[in-house]
Image (tube, helix red, strand yellow):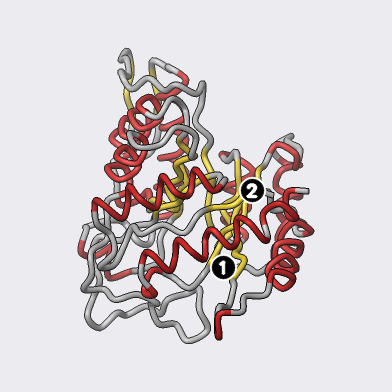
């Protein structure tokens, strides 16, 4: 099992100094990657509930900073050597996929092949409206966008789709990896179909370890239709949440959570040590504790 480090990409701790400090520390501690999400606009009175928590309330302060994915990943690339750089996740219908292909290729090239392009369809209808993005057609836009990105990275000289087309043209965005892995987020029939058809990985969001096992059965069905094997798909996601109440974190409990995700097929798991509301110094101490007490047993 490998681990995604906590990372200050949002909130008051998302500063130059903290981003560099945490990224370097994560690499030194043995974390495998960082992951950065995104939102562009938050409505004061949202129409849609947050789909990934029972209460439906977005678990952040929407008035605080939220760093741009590709800019931040490129910045982190300049300060690290091994840490993998994950977009977790970009909402592809918000973007022109030609631009995503170029931005992602640039990050991959400048990082010497460390990019993982995580893609989602999005859920916040208000945000789609603000950006003039196609909410009802977001699935179709995502499918075609991924297909277009793959065509550009392959060097195809033409592409014909419903929303985007080109012919007799060259794409100047050259990657370091032959094809940076595309990991697709979600936990639904549509997400499993999309992973099977277009994905190198499944970025698990909206499912616990037990539910992940159930969704894998659906994924296998779609993979069979595409003539693919489950071993071709990397499973990433979940979280080992460590409670530090009273200063006594439980390594056995953390390892138990990691083992549950490993049993579900996950090879790279998130780590939650309380969020950066506790401050960067305390977060780094907790990250170090996890790296010392849990990682060796999880990897062994």
Q: Which mark is residue 14?
A: none
Viewer-nearest residue: 96 or 104 = 104
Q: Is residue 13 above or below residue 221?
A: below
User: At numbered mark 1, what does the secondary structure look like: helix, strand or loop?
Assistant: loop
| Residue drawn where x is 23% and y is 64% of the image | 65
Q: What is the crowding at mark 2: few (fewer than 14 residues within 10 Å), some, or many (at least 20)?
A: some
Q: Which mark is residue 2?
A: 2
Q: Quadrant of residue 270?
A: bottom right
Q: What is the crowding at mark 1: few (fewer than 14 residues within 10 Å), some, or many (at least 20)?
A: some
| Residue drawn where x is 57% and y is 45% of the image | 30
Relative placement, left or right, of 111 versus 83 is left
Circle nearer the viewer, 1 or 2: 2
User: At numbered mark 2, what does the secondary structure look like: helix, strand or loop?
Assistant: strand
| Residue drawn where x is 70% and y is 47% of the image | 222
Residue with the mark numbered 1: 206
| Residue drawn where x is 47% and y is 86% of the image | 55
Q: Position of residue 120 (x, y in %)?
A: 45, 53
């Amino acid at each position: 099992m490998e681990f995604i480090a906590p990372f200050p990409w949002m909130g008051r701790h998302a500063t130059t100094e903290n981003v560099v400090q945490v990224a370097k520390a994560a690499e030194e501690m043995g974390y495998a990657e960082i992951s950065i999400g995104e939102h562009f606009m938050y409505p004061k009175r949202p129409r849609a509930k947050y789909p990934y928590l029972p209460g439906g309330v977005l678990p952040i302060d929407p008035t605080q900073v939220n760093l741009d994915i590709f800019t931040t990943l490129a910045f982190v690339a300049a300060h690290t050597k091994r840490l993998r750089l994950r977009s977790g996740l970009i909402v592809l219908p918000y973007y022109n996929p030609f631009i995503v292909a170029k931005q992602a290729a640039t990050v991959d090239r400048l990082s010497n092949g460390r990019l993982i392009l995580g893609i989602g369809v999005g859920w916040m209808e208000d945000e789609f409206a603000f950006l003039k993005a196609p909410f009802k057609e977001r699935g179709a836009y995502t499918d075609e966008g991924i297909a277009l990105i793959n065509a550009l990275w392959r060097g195809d000289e033409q592409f014909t789709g419903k929303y985007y087309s080109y012919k007799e043209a060259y794409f100047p965005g050259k990657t370091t990896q032959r094809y940076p892995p595309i990991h697709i987020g979600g936990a639904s029939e549509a997400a499993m179909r999309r992973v099977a058809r277009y994905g190198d990985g499944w970025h698990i969001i909206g499912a616990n370890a037990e539910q992940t096992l159930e969704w894998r059965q659906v994924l296998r069905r779609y993979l069979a239709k595409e003539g693919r094997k489950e071993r071709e798909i990397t499973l990433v996601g979940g979280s080992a949440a460590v409670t530090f109440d009273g200063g006594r974190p439980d390594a056995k409990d953390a390892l138990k959570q990691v083992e549950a995700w490993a049993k579900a097929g996950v090879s790279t798991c998130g780590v939650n040590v309380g969020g950066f509301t506790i401050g960067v110094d305390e977060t780094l101490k907790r990250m170090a504790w996890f790296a010392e007490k849990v990682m060796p047993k999880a990897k062994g």
